[in-house]
Image: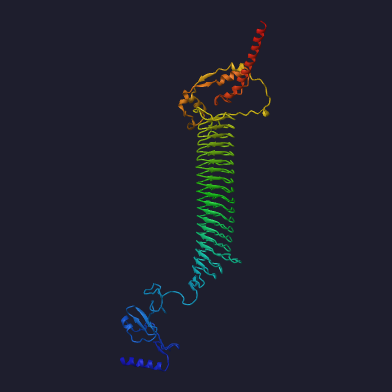
């Protein structure tokens, strides 16, 4: 047998020596023309020398191309002329290394890599379709058909069909399915379509020429085509924007319907969600200005502030639901929880918790104080300052209330003024009534009350001056009765039942507005004066229209009062009559003396 093997080897060597091809097979076929040795078998292989790593590395002067099987590494190794190379795994030098699908070991971070060693882009394919590229121009593309038309430099696109139609526009970032899908189409001028960043599925999908846009979130700035300088953060934010520019939207659906509006800022879910063409609006808070459509120059800060406004412009609202229900009011300013909540009027100002919360159609009102002016519907040019001041006013106009709970009894009255804590009218619908001082109450038209029932002194450093200019007095008559009127008067002293007065003047007011005696000592003070009803009777008996009587229009609701300064006139007349009588008596006396 050994002789046969030796003979076979000699024959092979002989054939090789003469340059002939050798075929080893069982079917009698000749060797392929390109092969020196052509071995064929259907059930056997070729064994190369097998040895340990130690045996392999001790082979003296191995020939280049020498092949062995390393039983320690369980892999084929060949000598490349300078080192042994592992055919089936990474080895020294890296040249000719095969990377395993199941991973590799023994790699060197300084020498081993996947990529090219020349200035050529590295492309990735799946099913022979474009799935990514590391471009030599600095662009990074990853995903099915991502940036497949891109020639622009320094672009980053990650996601299916991201940056799909872009060609030579550069400095773009698109992350997400179809992000910046149409960017660059129709660009004719330098700068168009540049410097856009889109992160999110279909973000900036329709953008063609718009530049300097930033979109973060699902379908953010989806319909934008040429609008520039926009920033959208949140699902569907600035979704319908097409040409509007320099808008900022942060929050889901913020500025969702904006199309051409520009320089709007929205921060919060659905903030300015309905805005289409309005400009220069600022909304901070969920649902702020959410119904605004075409109005401009509004500022709303706080949850649902101005959330129903659609057409009103140049408004400022700060606070939860501030100006929340108004739809078309202009030039209004509200600061506080639910202030001017239903406002449709113009030039209104409200500051404080729920101040002017009803709002409605009133205009040019100024309100400062929590829960003040809360019921107003159509009152105009009112001023309310203080907690709960004018909180019942509905249609009253031209009123002023300064002080906590001031003028709370007024609903429809006009031209009324109250100054002081709880200063008020006791009857609704008064006109030109004034109450000054804490708990001061006025109960009649064209009347002024200073102080309350506990006041004991009203004065100053000069006498009160009444209007008295002859140029404006008509129908002047000398018909003032003197002694006849004075003799009918009954001067008395008295004390005041302060509690009864308070009960009477505040009987129609709510419990919290009932008057209480602040100065109990006033009950013991003795006064000098007249009884108003007696003065009235005396004047009526003489047919004298005495101006010193302040007669109530309704004695069941209002009190009598006297103007004591007016008593000077009939008293002077009485003195004049007395002087005349004295002169006449003197003359009679002188005549009697002469006739003696």
* Residue in the image at 45% along x and 26% along y: 520
Residue, far top: 596
* Quarter containing the C terminus: top right
Instruction: Give the quarter of the image for residue 245.
Output: bottom right
Q: Position of residue 337 (x, y in %)?
A: 50, 44
Q: Is residue 56 above or below residue 244?
A: below
* Residue in the image at 50% along x and 63% along y: 177
Choose between 586 and 126: the one closer to the eye: 586
* Quarter containing the N terminus: bottom left
Q: Is residue 556 left or right of residue 108?
A: right
* Residue in the image at 64% along x and 15% along y: 580
Instruction: Give the quarter of the image for residue 247.
Output: bottom right
Choose between 218 and 562: the one closer to the eye: 562
Q: Is residue 308 visible?
A: no
Q: Position of residue 418 (x, y in %)?
A: 54, 34
Q: Position of residue 584 (x, y in %)?
A: 65, 13
Choose between 240 and 554: the one closer to the eye: 554
Q: Is residue 60 above or below residue 303?
A: below
């Amino acid at each position: 047998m050994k002789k046969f093997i030796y003979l076979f080897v000699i024959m092979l060597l002989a054939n090789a020596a003469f340059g002939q091809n050798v075929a080893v097979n069982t079917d009698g076929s000749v060797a392929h023309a390109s092969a020196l040795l052509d071995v064929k078998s259907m059930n056997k292989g070729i064994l190369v020398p097998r040895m340990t790593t130690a045996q392999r590395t001790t082979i003296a002067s191995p020939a280049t191309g020498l092949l062995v099987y390393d039983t320690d590494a369980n892999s084929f190794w060949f000598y490349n002329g300078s080192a042994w190379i592992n055919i089936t795994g990474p080895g020294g030098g890296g040249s000719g290394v095969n990377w395993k699908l199941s991973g590799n070991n023994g790699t060197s971070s300084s020498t081993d890599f996947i990529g090219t060693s020349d200035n050529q882009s590295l492309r990735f394919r799946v099913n022979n379709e474009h799935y990514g590229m590391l471009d030599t121009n600095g662009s990074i593309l990853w995903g099915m058909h991502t940036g497949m038309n891109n020639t622009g430099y320094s672009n980053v696109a990650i996601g299916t069909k991201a940056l799909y139609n872009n060609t030579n526009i550069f400095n773009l970032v698109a992350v997400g399915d179809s992000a910046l899908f149409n960017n660059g189409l129709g660009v004719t001028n330098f700068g168009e379509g540049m410097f856009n960043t889109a992160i999110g599925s279909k973000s900036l999908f329709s953008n063609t020429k718009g530049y300097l846009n930033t979109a973060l979130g699902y379908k953010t700035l989806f319909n934008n085509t040429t609008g520039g300088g926009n920033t959208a953060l949140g699902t569907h934010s600035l979704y319908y924007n097409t040409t509007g520019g320099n808008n900022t939207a942060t929050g889901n659906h913020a500025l969702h319907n904006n199309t051409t509006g520009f320089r709007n800022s929205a921060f919060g879910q659905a903030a300015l969600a309905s805005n289409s063409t309005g400009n220069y609006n600022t909304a901070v808070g969920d649902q702020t200005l959410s119904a605004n459509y075409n109005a401009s120059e509004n500022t709303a800060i706080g949850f649902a502030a101005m959330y129903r406004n659609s057409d009103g412009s140049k408004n400022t609202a700060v606070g939860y639901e501030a100006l929340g229900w108004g739809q078309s009011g202009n030039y209004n300013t509200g600061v506080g929880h639910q202030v001017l909540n239903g406002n449709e009027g113009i030039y209104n100002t409200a500051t404080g918790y729920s101040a002017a919360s009803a709002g409605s159609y009133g205009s040019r009102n100024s309100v400062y104080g929590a829960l003040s002016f809360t019921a107003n519907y159509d009152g105009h040019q009112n001023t309310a300052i203080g907690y709960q001041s004018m909180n019942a006013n509905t249609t009253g106009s031209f009123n002023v209330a300064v002080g906590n709970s001031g003028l709370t009894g007024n609903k429809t009255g006009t031209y009324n003024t109250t100054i002081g804590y709880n200063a008020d009218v006791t009857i609704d619908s008064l006109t030109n009534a004034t109450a000054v001082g804490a708990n001061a109450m006025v109960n009649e038209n064209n009347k002024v009350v200073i102080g309350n029932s506990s006041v004991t002194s009203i004065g100053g450093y000069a006498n009160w001056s009444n209007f008295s200019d002859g140029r404006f007095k008509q129908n002047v008559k000398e018909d003032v009765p003197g002694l006849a009127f004075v003799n009918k008067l009954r001067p008395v002293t008295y004390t005041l039942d302060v509690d009864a007065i308070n009960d009477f003047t505040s009987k129609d007011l709510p419990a919290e507005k009932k008057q209480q005696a602040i100065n109990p000592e006033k009950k013991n003070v003795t006064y000098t004066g007249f009884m108003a009803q007696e003065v009235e009777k005396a004047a009526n008996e003489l047919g004298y229209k005495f101006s010193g009587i302040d007669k109530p229009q309704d004695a069941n609701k209002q009190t009598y009062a006297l103007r004591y300064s007016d008593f000077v006139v009939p008293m002077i007349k009485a003195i004049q009559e007395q002087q005349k009588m004295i002169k006449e008596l003197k003359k009679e006396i002188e005549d009697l003396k002469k006739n003696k």
